[in-house]
Image: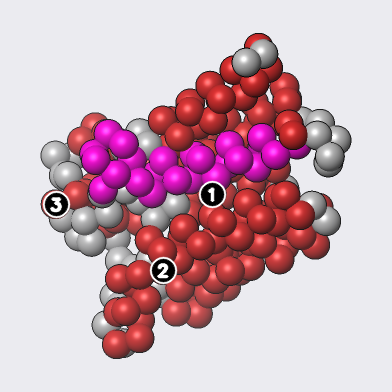
């Protein structure tokens, strides 16, 4: 194995391990005594952290989750990006996908108890296709304001991302990675989808 291949594998592993860090749990404990895994929806993402530990903890969690997607993808772009036909052209997209997978299925807790993947996916594609993330974010905002449900906004953004990525980049590689992270987001929202179908999905409210 040559040095560049070893570095690529190390970056993939590092992106997954960074993605798996439960910043929501750590920051909720820093801001309050709440454990988001045992309160609210039980999720470690920014929405439930905001509900259970306050808006400051929620914003800090959102920032950390975005960064753990953005930083590995930015590193991959800066050191490994190549022409479309190069194997290394796949690396930035794969790194973004691995970071999102780490957030959704963290090794530190036996691949259980992860987040929904939205913020980490947004961070990865903010490095790879920022205009596409802006479109997805607009979709999130419109759907959230219309429904007052974060899950509706998140699913709208996830559905829009692959199309926006292809529109702005015309890259099959990036579009495939965006479709994969969109699938992960929908998979992690399975319970929300069931509640939405039953009319039982709660509207977003911060901790009093």
Is residue 141 at all visible to an observer of this figure? no
Q: Position of residue 144 (x, y in %)?
A: 48, 71
Q: Which residue is mark 3?
A: 38
Say if 4 sits above or below 168 in the image. Answer: above
Q: Which residue is mark 1?
A: 121
User: Quadrant of the rendered structure where residue 2 is?
Assistant: top right
Q: Is residue 119 found left or right of 53 in the rendered image?
A: right
Residues in magenta? 89-112
Q: Nearer the viewer, residue 146 or 69?
A: 69
Q: Position of residue 185 (x, y in %)?
A: 46, 60
Crowding at label 3, few (<14), some or many (≥20) Cα neighbours within 10 Å?
Answer: few
Q: Is residue 77 found left or right of 15 in the rendered image?
A: right
Q: Is residue 53 found left or right of 15 in the rendered image?
A: left
Q: CA distance from mark 2 to mark 1?
A: 15 Å
Q: Position of residue 43 (x, y in %)?
A: 27, 54
**Of callouts 2 and 1, the N-terminal one:** 1
Is residue 48 at all visible to an observer of this figure? yes
**Of callouts 2 and 3, the N-terminal one:** 3
Say if 103 sits above or below 73 in the image. Answer: below
Q: Which residue is mark 2?
A: 151
């Amino acid at each position: 194995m040559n040095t560049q291949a070893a570095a690529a594998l190390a970056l993939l592993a590092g992106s997954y391990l960074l993605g798996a860090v439960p910043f929501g749990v750590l920051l909720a404990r820093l801001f309050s005594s709440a454990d988001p895994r045992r309160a609210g929806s039980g999720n470690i993402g920014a929405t439930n952290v905001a509900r259970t530990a306050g808006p400051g903890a929620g914003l800090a969690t959102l920032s950390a989750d975005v960064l753990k997607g953005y930083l590995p993808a930015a590193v991959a772009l800066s050191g490994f990006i190549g022409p479309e036909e190069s194997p290394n052209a796949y690396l930035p997209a794969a790194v973004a996908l691995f970071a999102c997978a780490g957030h959704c299925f963290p090794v530190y807790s036996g691949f259980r108890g992860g987040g929904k993947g939205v913020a980490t996916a947004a961070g990865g594609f903010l490095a790879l296709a920022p205009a596409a993330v802006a479109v997805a974010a607009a979709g999130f905002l419109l759907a959230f304001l219309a429904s007052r449900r974060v899950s509706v906004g998140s699913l709208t953004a996830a559905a829009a991302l692959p199309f926006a990525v292809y529109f702005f980049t015309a890259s099959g590689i990036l579009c495939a990675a965006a479709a994969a992270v969109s699938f992960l987001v929908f998979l992690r929202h399975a319970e929300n989808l069931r509640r939405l179908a039953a009319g039982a999905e709660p509207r977003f409210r911060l901790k009093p």
